Image: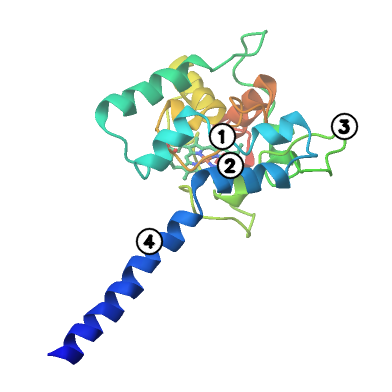
């Protein structure tokens, strides 16, 4: 009996110690360490270490927010979609096709001014059927335009999806390319053409 009591005392000591250790790494301390690591970074880079409201909601609810927050994400993300000044939402597929396999851009300390930021679509999607290297986090987009009726509604829906994936599906793993300033509205329109144009290799 005594031994059992001693054992439980040891266990209690062990197990109260664990949360105490965990508490030492408070979110304030963590923030301070992260901020110190980025102390000399530009304001633009520093901004990227903080979650925006949508990311915070998605983290908190593990990408499955309750209905009212889901709707709030959609509303907030839809509100930040911008369109090209020309209002042409279907641009040049050849320009996008050249960049769809390019992951260049937004590198800390290595960005060359004026160099085009790539869409990096192949990292997550299959596109042209003759490209053998592609990721599969996202669905295959091969034949995307071939299988659909191309009208203004589809062109706009495709534009909105690429500009801001979370304006369509909250907590999507797809980057918010236009909304976060990775791609310009004109570039997004080029990617729309890459997916929809009958001449694009995606629809071969
Ligand atoms: C980091 C991974 C990732 C990258 C990079 C990425 N996507 Fe996606 N994409 C996804 C995921 C995951 C989905 C499915 C969830 C969703 O619909 O948001 C998706 C969905 C889509 C859809 C909707 C497909 C459908 O059938 O509804 C389109 C269109 C699309 N992506 C286009 C693109 C284009 C164009 C690029 C490059 C500019 C790109 N994606 C880059 C992950 C990615």
> Image point 75% across, 36% down: which residue?
117
Q: Earlier in the sequence, mark 4 or mark 3?
A: 4
> Image point 32% across, 27% down: which residue?
69
Indicate yes or no: mark 1 CB to ligand 1 under 8 Å. Answer: yes
Q: Residues within 10 Å of mark 3 (few under 14, many from 20)?
A: few
4 vs 2, front mark: 4
Between the C-alphas of marks 4 and 2, the distance is 53 Å
Residue 24, compared with residue 116, is above or below; it is below
Residue to which mark 4 is pinned: 19
In the picture as drawn, the residue positioned furthest to the front comes out as: 2
Residue to which mark 1 is pinned: 195
Is label 2 in a helix, a strand or a loop?
Answer: helix
> Image point 48% across, 47% down: which residue?
138
Q: In front here: 50 or 19?
A: 19
Between the C-alphas of marks 1 and 3, the distance is 28 Å
Please tell me how many numbered marks the rendered image carries: 4
Is label 3 in a helix, a strand or a loop?
Answer: loop
Between the C-alphas of marks 4 and 3, the distance is 48 Å
Pointer 3 with pointer 2, Cβ within 8 A = no
Residue to which mark 2 is pinned: 202
Q: Earlier in the sequence, mark 2 or mark 1?
A: 1
- Residue 113, disc: 3
Pointer 2 with pointer 1, Cβ within 8 A = yes
Q: Earlier in the sequence, mark 4 or mark 2?
A: 4
Q: Position of residue 103 (x, y in %)?
A: 71, 46
Residue 17, compared with residue 140, is above or below; it is below
Q: Is residue 87 left or right of residue 144?
A: right
1 vs 3, front mark: 3
Which corner quadrant holds the N terminus? bottom left
Is label 4 in a helix, a strand or a loop?
Answer: helix
């Amino acid at each position: 009996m005594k031994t059992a009591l001693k054992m439980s005392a040891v266990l209690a000591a062990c197990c109260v110690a664990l949360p105490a250790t965990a508490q030492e790494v408070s979110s304030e301390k963590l923030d301070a360490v992260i901020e110190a690591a980025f102390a000399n970074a530009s304001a633009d880079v520093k901004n990227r270490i903080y979650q925006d409201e949508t990311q915070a909601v998605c983290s908190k609810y593990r990408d499955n927010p309750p209905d009212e927050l889901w709707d709030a994400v959609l509303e907030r993300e839809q509100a930040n979609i911008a369109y090209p000044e020309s209002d042409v939402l279907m641009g040049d597929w050849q320009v996008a096709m050249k960049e769809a396999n390019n992951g260049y851009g937004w590198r800390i300390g290595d960005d060359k001014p004026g160099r085009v930021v790539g869409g990096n679509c192949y990292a997550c999607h299959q596109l042209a059927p003759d490209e053998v290297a592609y990721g599969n986090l996202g669905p295959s987009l091969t034949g995307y335009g071939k299988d659909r009726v191309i009208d203004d509604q589809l062109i706009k829906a495709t534009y909105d999806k690429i500009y801001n994936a979370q304006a369509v599906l909250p907590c999507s793993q797809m980057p918010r390319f236009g909304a976060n300033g990775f791609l310009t509205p004109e570039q997004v329109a080029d990617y729309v053409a890459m997916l929809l144009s009958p001449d694009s290799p995606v629809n071969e």
